[in-house]
Image (cartoon, helix red, strand yellow):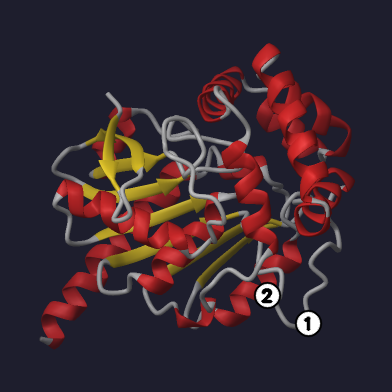
Amino acid sequence: MARAALSRDGRELVFDSWGDPHGHPVFLLHGTPGSHQGPRPRSMVLYQLGVRLIAYDRPGYGGSTRKPGRRVVDAAADVEDIAQFLGLDEFSVVGRSGGGPHALACAAELSGRVRSAAVLVTLAPPDAPELDWFAGMTEHNVREYTNARDHPDALQSSLAQNADAMRADPMALLNTLDDEMPEVDRHVVADAGIRRMLHRNFMSGIEKNADGWIDDAVAFTLPWGFDPAKITVPTLLWHGEKDVFSPVDHFTWLAGQIEHATVVLEPSAAHFAAVPVLPKVLGWVREHAKAGSDATATTA
């Protein structure tokens, strides 16, 4: 059952948890648009993995209070505040799609508490040197991020209309993107179970308005507020080579910045393949969190 923690500046942060209550805590940061009800493995799978999975609504989504002008780096403080509420000293973070930059922020800014991290099909920072940020990206995303950067009124109008359409038909967004999806993505989202998870995710996130979606888009196109090269915790970067929503050059750039990152590039996968691979990724962060803790204990 969803609960709410207070952020250090007094905002409500709605979250929930599943799986083994005594397992390794992992924060799962949802995609864009999305919510704490986003795609996740079943509780039985989480118990088998030894994972306590925690997800929250980013500000402006679902029940979480909006934070106007938020930056990607601000997610680190929100995650830390929820961890403090739950009495968690250490945890891991996993971010899929729009949750990827926010998970990287946690890994960079909370190195004393984050034991391992994984990001799947993430964007890179918009000011990444020598990266053509829009190259290989769908027209839909180019238009949305260009509006976020240059035409905020147009962004607000278009995403508010998209949210209205999704409230009438939760699959409206996927239907709009269908022509731009590679065939491998169409195959993934055709699965009835995944469509149910995406349905629940979208509806929970934009049930009231499009504020969180708008703020995510703007945050992605502004300087993120941290340097990914600061990340020293064990980190997995997972990407599908056919991704047209977060192009593979973003993955390549991040792989060159995060020293000792474990990189997995699936040549036949695209964006939505990050959903069925989640159980393996959660197993990876749990094992590498344990390895990191053992190494720290041995050094001490």
Label 2 sits on residue: 253
Name the outermost residue toward the bottom: 299
Which quarter shows the C terminus?
bottom left
Amino acid identity at mark 1: Glu
Is residue 171 in sight in this rendering? Answer: no
Say whether residue 199 is left or right of residue 55: right
Tell me where residue 137 appears, x and y as whole percent.
83, 54
Assess disc 2: are there few (<14), some (14-19) or many (≥20) residues with their C-alpha within 10 Å of its C-alpha.
Answer: some
Vertical relation: 104 (above or below) 191 = below
What residue is disc 1 on? 130
Question: How many dots with numbers?
Answer: 2
Q: Nearer the viewer, mark 2 or mark 1?
A: 1
| Proximity of marks 2 and 1: CB atoms separated by less than 8 Å | yes
**Helix or strand or loop: what does disc 1 sit on?**
loop
Which circle marks residue 159 in the picture?
Answer: none
Q: Is residue 18 above or below residue 89?
A: above
Front-lying residue, 56 or 211? 211
Q: Please tell me which residue is depicted at 48% across the width and 65% down the height of the picture.
A: 73
Residue 18's quadrant in the figure?
top left
Residue at left offset 17%, top offset 61%: 89
Residue 176 in the figure: left or right of residue 121 = right
SS state under label 2: helix
Please tell me which of labels 2 and 1 falls first in the chain: 1
Q: Nearer the viewer, residue 64 or 90?
A: 64
The Cα atoms of the two marked residues, 2 and 1, are separated by 9 Å
> Residue 114: where, in percent of width, then height?
30, 65
In the displayed structure, 102 sits above or below 156; it is: below
Q: Which amino acid does the dot numbered 2 rest on?
A: Trp
Q: Quadrant of residue 273?
A: top right
Quadrant in the picture for residue 149: bottom right
Q: Position of residue 109 (x, y in %)?
A: 39, 72
Q: Is residue 126 above or below residue 212?
A: below
